[in-house]
Amino acid sequence: MTAPVAHPSPNCGPRRNGLRPSLIVLHYTAMSSASAALERLCDPAFEVSAHYLIGKDGMLWQLVDEADRAWHAGQGRWAGMDDINSRSIGIELDNSGAEPFSEPLMTRLEDLMAGIMTRWDIAPAGVIAHSDMAPTRKWDPGRRFDWRRLARQGSSVWPEPAAPGDFTRDAARFGYDVSCGEDAVLDAVRQRFRPWATGPLDDIDRALVAGLAARFGIDRDTP
């Protein structure tokens, strides 16, 4: 993989409390072009950034050093943790959310993630959507993103359905902040694992989340 183009953003700072990246958070830009997104992510007036931006053509920019804290996640929680910015690497993808993600973009993302996961010892379960950690206010990378493709390469996780259980309990064990409410969590789950499902919570949803909890559930008694 060719090296990323350096395009430093001022919108960053040190990670707090000695934290290291244990998550990768994926976003879409929802802007007219990668160049427009690059300008926004480097404009101090907007106070937003990411570590990396990938264009539809596979062009890769690095905006913030991986050791530093980019301002990409905002308020939210995952697996009982807050300050996700201090705990994560943020990757912006040039996409509106209403179109397929291009092959050059996906190929570049896979190569980039492999390196990040190795450098920081990030497990596949630590690769999440922006919508996973902020279900009430974010929808990226959206229903068009191919999570199953990443899971096949060991770069994310995919559920193996289990016996349907308690949706809220199992969603919390997998990592969702269930204080957001069942509807918001259900929408986040479906965006990622069952993108074209509609209607009320059903046993398919319960089975998928039960499988995720069984295989990748967090132990909240462990510091």
Image (tube, rainbow, N blue to C red):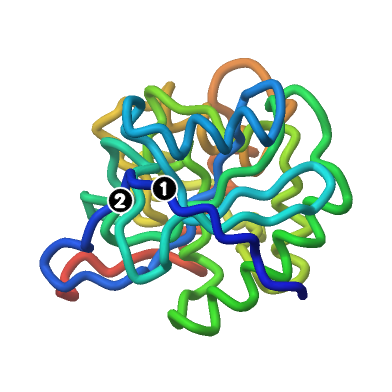
Secondary structure beneath dot 1 equals loop
Picture layout, residue 96 above or below residue 70: above
Q: Of circles 2 and 1, which is in front?
A: 1
The residue that disc 2 covers is 12
Side of 216 relative to 32 (left or right): left
Image spot of residue 40 (x, y percent):
49, 30
Q: Is residue 149 visible?
A: yes
Side of 88 relative to 201 (left or right): left
Image spot of residue 81 (x, y percent):
23, 55
Q: Amino acid at mark 2?
A: Cys
Q: Residue at x 63, y 23 (%)?
A: 31
Give residue 65's quadrant in the image.
bottom left
The C terminus: image quadrant = bottom left
The N terminus: image quadrant = bottom right
Q: Residue at x 49, y 83 (%)?
A: 119
Q: Amino acid at mark 1?
A: Ser
Determine whether label 2 and label 1 are within 8 Å by CB: yes
222, 72: nearer the viewer: 72
Q: Residue at x 62, y 41 (%)?
A: 192
Q: Residue furthest top?
A: 199
Q: Residue at x 62, y 63 (%)?
A: 156
Q: CA distance from mark 2 to mark 1?
A: 7 Å
User: Badge 2, how many Cα within 10 Å: few under 14, some, many 20+?
Assistant: many
Give residue 159's quadrant in the image.
bottom right
The residue that disc 1 covers is 9
Secondary structure beneath dot 2 equals strand
- Count of numbered circles on the image: 2
Side of 182 relative to 153 (left or right): left
Image spot of residue 34 (x, y percent):
68, 35
Q: Is residue 169 visible?
A: no
